[in-house]
């Protein structure tokens, strides 16, 4: 393993998750930020780097009273926060700042103070996709799935099983939105959204936020929390329009970001104890397991069916229940990072905590398979 | 008919929309590397060459992947297909599939399709697809 790139010394989600009609999006950012600052004993005056997506970081700096010497407003969808971790680590190493705050807040369900995602009619997406009336991610992100299913013989039951297994993990998390056990039959009987996707194969739409605080590895011991080291990062972009995805059976952005992160960390797939794959919809973990090299193309559904990602399995995956069960405000990446930090700190809820977990891989996705960010974390 | 938001052409795409209004479908081909691409742009995304020509399509395509959208907007008749087709010339294109039931049984992947042109405003005609007349009845 190579020397850590940076260390996460503060991490927290918003005080509440779920349905929060009393919280604006900006205040979700602030609540998460204040919780993360409290987590590591800092105040806004200690922060000299700030990164966020959705909200303008200038507004956040103003609101929180931060005077940064480094700012990152990268917004490439739900994996933006993985890229913020990568960029913050590089900025700290380059001496541009010492202590970085990364925030996320989103009123995805209640839409209070929400910054909407708009597609102008003169954009390429507006011209060449919207006329066919796709309605949001549930019809665009899911478009490659049938080609994948036909190529590899993957069934609707296989998609449903992703939800079923991840619900087992959610059952351990008091803050998870959907916690009750669910069967494959129940998933397949749930309301149709966009065939072959039923509502229980789709991510939640909820309100919440989260924040991280990063600093240099040699400063990490000065904080009250157990440091979590960032040992590898990667990012890539393939497209914005799903019709420009070259291979509907595998995400190029996933592969490029993952390979870069593993190379940076200097570890093998076999070294990984814990895995988070941004599950906007039930097919995404299948693509992720394959693109990250944990299984060969076409093997992911069988890998899950054999129990390897479930509680007690050899590669626990999406141990908070994922975006399908835990929470998903629209940009889920922050919550995947939060769960990985809990696992590396050893503070995940009883039952969900992976014993002796030392290395966690967090895979984010943005747009409709269009962008990706990978972060590899290690327990100190 | 269900109506998505209407495209607003730019100076770089107006020629494409002029063509669909005439009942013609085009992709682009790079003079330097032969790469074919869609949507239109005045250069080649494979090699960066600025010399690209318009290649008139046959109108034949195959069904590459799709979903049947049950979140039907106001004014819609019922679940409808949002599809991606592979044009005979190579590139993928988003579209709707018409002239057949909007069901998995009627829509096997790789089925043969042909283009139809649907005027949706004075300036915009959308290319859509239906089961090919000479296909073996798949989806008919």
Image (cartoon, coloured by chain):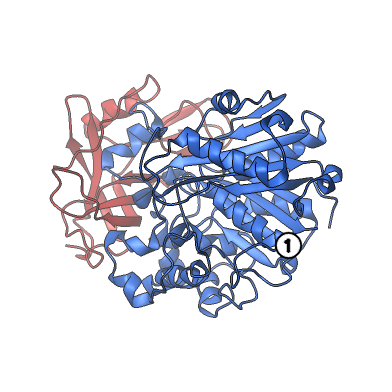
Chain colours: A blue, B red
Between A88 and A129, the residue placed more toward the observer is A88
Q: Dot 1: what SS? A: strand
Residue A198 in view of the camera: no
Residue under the image location 29 percent in, 65 percent down: B108
Chain identity of mark 1? A
Between B24 and A253, the residue placed more toward the observer is A253
Pinpoint residue B52: horizontal percent, then vertical percent. 47, 29
Residue under the image location 44 percent in, 45 percent down: A330
In which quadrant will I find the C terminus of chain A? bottom right
Q: Is residue A341 above or below residue A219?
A: below
Determine whether, in the image, residue B100 is placed left or right of residue A376: left
In which quadrant will I find the N terminus of chain A? bottom right
Pinpoint residue A331: horizontal percent, then vertical percent. 49, 45
Residue placed farthest to the top in the image? B11
Q: Which residue is mark 1?
A: A359
Pinpoint residue B72: horizontal percent, then vertical percent. 21, 49
């Amino acid at each position: 393993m190579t020397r850590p790139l940076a260390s996460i010394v503060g991490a927290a989600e918003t005080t509440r998750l779920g349905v929060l009609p009393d919280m604006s999006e900006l205040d979700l950012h602030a609540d998460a930020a204040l919780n993360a600052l409290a987590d590591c004993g800092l105040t806004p005056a200690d922060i000299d780097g700030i990164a966020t997506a959705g909200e303008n970081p200038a507004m956040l700096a103003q609101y929180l009273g931060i005077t940064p010497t480094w700012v990152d407003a990268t917004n490439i969808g739900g994996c933006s926060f993985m890229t913020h971790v990568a960029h913050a680590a590089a900025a700290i190493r380059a001496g541009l700042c010492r202590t970085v705050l990364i925030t996320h807040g989103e009123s995805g369900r209640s839409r209070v103070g929400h910054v909407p995602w708009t597609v102008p009619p003169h954009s390429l997406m507006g011209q060449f996709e919207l006329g066919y009336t796709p309605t949001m991610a549930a019809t665009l992100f899911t478009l490659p799935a049938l080609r994948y299913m036909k190529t590899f013989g993957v069934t609707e039951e296989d998609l449903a099983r992703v939800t079923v297994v991840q619900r087992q993990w959610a059952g351990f998390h008091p803050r998870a939105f959907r916690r009750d056990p669910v069967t494959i039959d129940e998933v397949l009987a749930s309301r149709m959204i966009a065939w072959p996707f039923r509502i229980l194969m789709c991510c939640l739409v909820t309100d919440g936020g989260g924040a991280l605080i990063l600093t240099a590895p040699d400063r990490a011991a000065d904080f009250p929390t157990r440091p979590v080291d960032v040992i590898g990062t990667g990012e890539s972009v393939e497209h914005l329009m799903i019709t420009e995805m070259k291979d509907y059976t595998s995400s190029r952005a996933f592969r490029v970001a993952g390979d870069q992160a593993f190379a940076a960390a200097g570890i093998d797939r076999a070294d990984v104890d814990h895995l988070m794959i941004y599950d906007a919809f039930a097919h995404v973990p299948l693509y992720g397991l394959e693109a990250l090299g944990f299984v060969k193309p076409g093997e992911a559904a069988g890998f899950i069916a054999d129990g390897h990602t479930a509680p007690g399995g050899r590669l626990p995956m999406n141990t908070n229940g994922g975006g399908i069960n835990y929470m998903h405000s629209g940009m889920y990446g922050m919550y995947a990072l939060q769960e990985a930090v809990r696992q590396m700190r050893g503070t995940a809820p009883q039952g969900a905590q992976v014993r002796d977990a030392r290395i966690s891989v967090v895979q984010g996705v943005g747009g409709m398979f269009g962008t990706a960010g990978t972060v590899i974390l290690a327990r100190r | 008919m269900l109506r998505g938001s209407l495209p607003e052409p730019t100076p770089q795409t107006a020629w494409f929309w002029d063509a669909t209004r005439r009942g013609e479908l085009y992709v682009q081909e790079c003079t330097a590397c032969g790469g074919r691409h869609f949507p239109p742009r005045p250069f080649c995304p494979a090699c960066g060459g600025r010399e690209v020509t318009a290649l008139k399509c046959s109108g034949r395509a195959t069904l590459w992947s799709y979903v049947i959208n049950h979140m039907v907007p106001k004014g819609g008749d019922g679940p409808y297909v949002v599809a991606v087709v592979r044009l005979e010339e190579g590139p993928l294109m988003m579209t709707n599939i018409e002239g057949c039931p909007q069901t998995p049984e009627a829509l096997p992947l790789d089925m043969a399709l042909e283009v139809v042109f649907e005027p949706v405003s004075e300036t915009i005609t959308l290319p859509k697809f239906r089961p090919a007349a000479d296909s073996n009845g798949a989806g008919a």
